[in-house]
Amino acid sequence: MTETAKKKNVRWVEEPEIGFWESTFVPAILSGLKTTLKHVIDRKPVTQQYPEVKPELPLHYRGVHRLNRDEKDRVKCVACMMCATACPANCISIEAQAAPPEWPDRDKFCKTFVLDELRCIYCGMCEEACPVDAIELTHIYDLTGETRSDLLYDREKLLSVFDKTKNDPRDPVRTRRGTLGPAAEFQQLPTLGPATVVPTADRAAKAETAGVIRTGGEVK
Amino acid sequence: MASVIVNGKEVEIGANERLNCIQAAAKAGVEIPAYCWHPALSVVASCRMCLVEVGDKKPDGTVAMQPKLVPGCQTPAKDGTVIVADSQKVKDARKATLEYLLLNHPLDCPTCDQAGECYLQDYSFDYGRGYSRLNEPKNIKPDKTYIGDQITLFTDRCIMCTRCVRFTREVTGSAELQVVSRGSHEEIDIFPGHPVNNPLAGNVVDLCPVGALCSKDFLYQQRVWWLKTQNSVCPGCSTGCSVTVDQNEDRVYRLKPRVNEKSQGHFMCDEGRFGWKYTHSEQRLTSAEIRSNGQTTSKDWDAVLKAVRTALQKAAGIGKGKIAAVLSPWMTVEEAWILGSYLKSLSSNVILALGPVRVSGQDDHFPKDIKGNVIQPVKFTIRAEKCPNRAGVEAVLKHLVGDVMPFEELLRLSSAGQFNAVYLVGGDPAGWISDLQAEAFSKVETVIVQDFLPSPVLKHATHVLPSGTFVEREGTYVNYKGLAQLVRRSVRGPDGSRPDSRILWELSERSGLVQTDAVRKEIASAVSALAALDHAELKNDGVLLSAAEPVGAK
């Protein structure tokens, strides 16, 4: 770029000149006083009346975790440890156990599930990672405890959070999907496109929605 | 010199190397994916994953390609072979093969133990289509939870590569596994009443490229991406299999064989594979102690080491031949050297004996026929000598004291009250001394015991030094044929215990932290039989001390 072209592209901003009134500072003082007077007249309270009045939280608020139960009241978790892997704060520890023979739909489940609510940063990665939607974050934010170990939530405590919140409209159970999530059971999963490029001659490219993966059942 | 052209790049192969296309391509740095092919097993060419274009370069420079894709595992590479592994035709074939293999695969990766080290995952990611076109329900076969004491089969995950079947037929000779049914109903199964319980059974789990065969011992214990891996040596017998130790948070979860043609090849036995459990035993010794008249007077490491040093110096000052030491064949060469040379520096007449070498039964060779006769060529041997480093410790002792006193002779001398102080190093997890033998040390004034598990001799001990197992050691083991391999530290021992090398390092008042490399150099320059320890190759596959004369051969 030449020197002249450079100068052409530069827009110079001049400092505004201060006039007579500005230099007296009276308009600035008056506009400040206007704000003060507005607050003198306005009687609407700004203080939140917590805990008497609980705040309205957005639906996607991320509070204390819960472990969901399936239709048979078993813990939904399959102990795949994806949440523990995804957790950036390393606050989840799970011990897996082989599922009893009367659970033919499961290979394993969580024997212990301990989540350190103090260590957690409530990022929601565990919820994202879970392939069976077993762990979810609820709207509960006011958790207290007298000791650190009180806030180590174990499996039973996390299940009790589910029992407490499952009928709350703010914490809907987001899916009713079964054992192992998309790869194992979905009927239809529309994606933006297939993960790999489909040659135009390919049968998949002629499907009404590219990348629809079907595994049995009736599909429209 | 023979040369092969892989993806247009010429690569030299040895004139007498018998390579297939997969191996030849690997030499050129090109990966040809394969499931059923394994370097230690026969070729079946059934998975069709390694299909490549192959042709011949004629002397006049023209290239004649074969019209069809051929399996790389089954096609020998010779001078002038042209391998094309990156054409669109080959890529399409791989996509089709993977789609076919995944037709009935349950895709339960989140709960599958193999996830993370699964060839089906890796190849699908690298070469696969990324989506399925299957409209029909999958053919899911029930799992077989018992096909062996240590092995479980997730039938639906199997891709029918038959590596496991060929392993039991060709390497163990026991042939418990077979394929039943045909087509998409094919399953791996055992003959009724003949589970896979042979001494090498655990290898089928490693051979399985997917998560079909799983080890019951490791099942659901850890996700594999959490494990930290360290190369080491199995201490189970004098074969000294190269292994990898997989641990997480100072807990060992599994041992896997590491391919080492110099040592054992591709496999390891179940005794070694599952034989590390004593490492996390509840009975591990965890406090250094000074005892007198049945009372523990101190549990402080510094005080104990100082007392041991003082006691040894006192005994050395009394007169000739009053100190004796038993060096365990479970010690590394470096540990034996530090202890041996330290005692030697205290008293030139110190008596050094090799600890008991446990031998159980006979060397067990594989494969075997149905009557138990060994079939030649032998592919794997479990040795009867159940300690990892007799040859190494013996070489150190021979250098230091000339001839090594047998353990029984030392017991006899000790019963006769010949010694003022004895330094006993244990290390055999199955026990190395009986109650009766321990009585030999009841009259000795100073009995220093360095061990990690309780043994009968502890009741006579005046000084107890809790030491470490093989996963806590750092050093060199020398196997039956004089192959020196590095044992590397994988985990920290329980609180209160210290690895042998650190105990001995501090006892002999060497400065700073333990430096096994420096000790190894010291040994290599001092002991002619162990001069090879200086070799750089030791850090890889190990180094043979002497091809002509194995160390410690009697």
Image (cartoon, coloured by chain):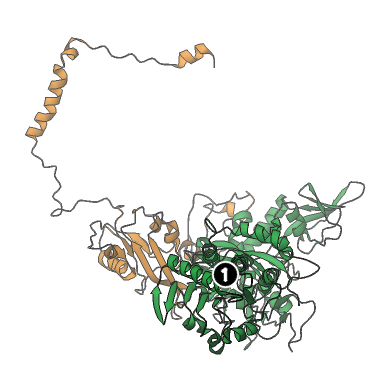
Chain colours: A orange, B green
Q: Is residue A217 visible?
A: no
Q: Give the quarter of the image for residue A143.
A: bottom left
Name the image quarter holding residue A150: bottom left
Q: Where in the figure is residue B350, as x and y percent of width and height?
A: 62, 73
- Between A49 and B63, the one nearer to me in the picture: A49
Q: Position of residue B79 (x, y in %)?
A: 86, 54
Q: Is residue B361 above or below residue A197?
A: below
Numbered disc total: 1
- The residue wearing badge 1 is B470
- Out of B220 and B330, give the one closest to the viewer: B330
Residue B407 versus residue B261 in the image, above or below: below
Picture residue at 14% right of the left edge, 21% below the top = A29
Q: Left or right: where does residue B158 sit relative to residue B81?
A: left
Above/below status of A88 relative to B528: above
Residue B465 at what x, y percent from top left?
Answer: 49, 72
Please report the residue visible at 58 percent of the width from the left and 87 percent of the height from the top: B416
Q: Residue furthest top?
A: A20
Q: Chain of mark 1?
A: B
